[in-house]
């Protein structure tokens, strides 16, 4: 491994490869900051361009866009409560509250440092243990994923605030909204009401930009806020006890992200909710979450980047893409006649190790790009809201339209903005709706897949050990949920 990695660095430090690595992470950061323009869409658009590049240069650039977007997505979540990526939705909960308290610099710094630590850990995992660790992904079938997704729903408890019942209702509403469109297995219409646009369903980008971005503008306008924050911005790097708490939360989020990143289907958006839930459960003061708690930024952002980089392990070791974005990267390999998997390290070791080495370099480049800009980004919180508000609305509308080039998505964004405004005015939690929207289709897919495997029998969920473990854990968490929710409301 040492020899291979050294050869990889020799290839990655080639001027042309280095340039495309830097271009990739820079584009990824911009893509992460701009809502609606996700890494998958950007990489898909650039695929024809990469055909004119050398294989190493093309794949290094596309990989940089992917993990670079994980860095950039937190910026607008923290500053203006507009998630740049679906995986940054949960960062809004505490990140924007920190901005309103004059702690935007600390939140941005923690996000950048946590992202660097988690991504570095993921790259080390990729370098050292890709083949043996990726084997565990092969043990997961539809029943195991059903158990895992069902367990993920326990995060509703910590996201529901004072009313667990209301959180569950909102989560179920999110699942219902996600089911609108075409049944993926039968091809029949569901909740389309004869509308061609509704047959396409609601896209996640307009949903979360409306629930968080537009609703925040309406709430701020109603309150007559002159700017997000007034006064001194204070320090830009957390210190003392705050730094210690952020460091511990970063390590927890990194560990969880690395473990789940090996599993196909565990997208960063799901993992960030789980990281937030775990952090809140182990905290001595869960009632502070959602009010500017630094752990609520550190853990999800670390988990976000850890799961993104860990996804390269099954991709490169087994040829299994764990997310749609990595599926596009797999297509880039195939354009050049390369097949990720064990044969990649046997037939094209120089390329494989060049890609891995470039990720070390790109990760350093990202933290060098992001940390110096913390002070500049933080000062945006001082801009008068009469300028910021219209800008946020414009970003939301453009982001919503750019997903599918459809005005239906723009009106959906407006609708969910009004829904979010109404919910927040009545102190109803909005995060459970996003969680239900993300997990609902996954739960349905794996449930129906499992029932097809067992010819309709439910015994398949109890005779497979991994699935049974997740079901038991889910039951235990539900039993403890009453006590946990009581401690939050005290």
Image (cartoon, rainbow, N blue to C red):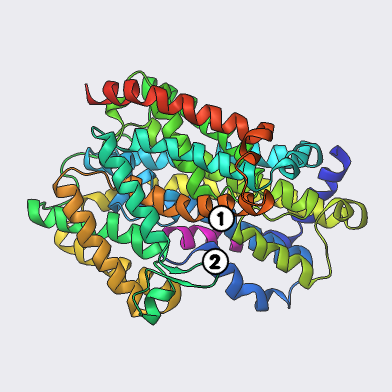
Instruction: Decide: few, some or many residues near mark 1? Use Cα within 10 Å; few <14, some 14-19, many ≥20.
Output: some
Q: Majority secondary structure of the magenta segment? A: helix
Q: Earlier in the sequence, mark 2 or mark 1?
A: 2
Lateral position of residue 99 relative to residue 4, left or right: left
Give me the residue at 92% from left, 52% from top: 346
Lateral position of residue 397 relative to residue 344, left or right: left
Q: Is residue 367 above or below residue 196?
A: above
Give me the residue at 79% from left, 48% from top: 317
Region rendered in magenta: 22-34
Q: Is residue 433 above or below residue 136?
A: below
In percent of width and height, residue 480 lies at 40, 22
Give me the residue at 36% from left, 32% from top: 294
Instruction: Tell me the distance, in whole angstroms, between the alpha carbons under discs 2 and 1.
Output: 8 Å
Viewer-proximal residue among 44 and 356: 44
Q: Which residue is mark 1?
A: 445
Give me the residue at 87% from left, 53% from top: 349
Lateral position of residue 239 relative to residue 122, left or right: left
Contact check, label 2 and label 1, Cβ < 8 Å: yes
Residue 29: in magenta span: yes
Tell me if I can see residue 144 in this picture: yes
Viewer-proximal residue among 98 and 278: 278
- The quarter of the image holding the N terminus is top right
Residue 283: in magenta span: no
Q: Is residue 348 above or below residue 258?
A: below
Q: Which residue is mark 2?
A: 184
In percent of width and height, residue 164 lies at 29, 34
């Amino acid at each position: 491994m040492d020899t291979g990695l050294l050869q990889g660095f020799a290839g990655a430090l080639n001027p042309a490869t280095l340039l495309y690595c830097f271009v990739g992470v820079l584009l990824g950061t911009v893509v992460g900051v701009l809502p609606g323009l996700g890494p998958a869409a950007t990489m898909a658009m650039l695929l024809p361009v990469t055909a004119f590049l050398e294989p190493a240069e093309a794949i290094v650039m596309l990989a940089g866009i992917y993990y670079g977007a994980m860095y950039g997505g937190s910026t607008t979540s923290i500053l203006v409560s507009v998630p740049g990526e679906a995986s940054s939705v949960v960062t809004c909960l505490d990140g924007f509250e920190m901005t309103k308290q004059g702690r935007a610099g600390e939140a941005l710094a923690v996000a950048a440092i946590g992202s660097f630590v988690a991504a570095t850990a993921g790259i080390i995992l990729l370098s050292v243990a890709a083949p043996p660790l990726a084997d565990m992904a092969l043990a997961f079938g539809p029943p195991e994923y059903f158990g895992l997704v069902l367990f993920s729903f326990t995060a509703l408890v910590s996201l529901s605030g004072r009313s667990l019942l209301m959180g569950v209702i909102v989560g179920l509403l999110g699942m219902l909204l996600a089911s609108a469109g075409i049944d993926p297995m039968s091809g029949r219409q569901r909740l389309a009401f004869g509308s061609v646009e509704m047959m396409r369903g609601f896209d996640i980008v307009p949903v979360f930009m409306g629930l968080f971005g537009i609703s925040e503008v309406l709430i701020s306008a109603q309150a007559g806020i002159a700017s997000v924050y007034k006064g001194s911005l204070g320090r830009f790097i957390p210190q003392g006890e705050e730094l210690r708490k952020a460091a511990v939360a970063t390590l927890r989020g990194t560990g969880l992200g690395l473990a789940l990143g090996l599993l196909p289907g565990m997208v960063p958006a799901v993992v960030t909710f789980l990281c937030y839930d775990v952090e809140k459960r182990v905290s001595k003061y869960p009632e502070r979450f959602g009010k500017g708690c630094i752990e609520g930024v550190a853990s999800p952002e670390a988990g976000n980047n850890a799961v993104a980089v860990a996804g390269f392990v099954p991709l490169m070791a087994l040829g299994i893409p764990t997310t749609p974005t990595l599926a596009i990267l797999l297509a880039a390999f195939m354009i050049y006649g390369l097949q990720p998997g064990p044969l990649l390290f046997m037939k094209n070791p120089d390329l494989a190790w060049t890609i891995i080495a470039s990720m070390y370099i790109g990760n350093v480049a990202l933290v060098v790009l992001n940390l110096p800009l913390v002070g500049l980004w933080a000062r945006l919180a001082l801009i008068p809201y009469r300028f910021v508000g219209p800008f946020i609305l414009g970003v939301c509308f453009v982001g919503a339209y750019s997903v599918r080039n459809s005005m239906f998505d723009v009106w959906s964004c407006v609708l969910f903005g009004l829904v979010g405004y109404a919910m927040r005015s009545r102190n109803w939690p909005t995060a459970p709706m996003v969680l239900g929207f993300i997990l609902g289709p996954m739960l349905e897919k794996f449930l129906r897949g499992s029932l097809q495997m067992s010819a309709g029998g439910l015994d398949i969920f109890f005779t497979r050990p991994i699935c049974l473990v997740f079901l038991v854990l889910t039951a235990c968490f539900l039993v403890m949920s009453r006590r946990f929710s009581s401690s939050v409301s005290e």
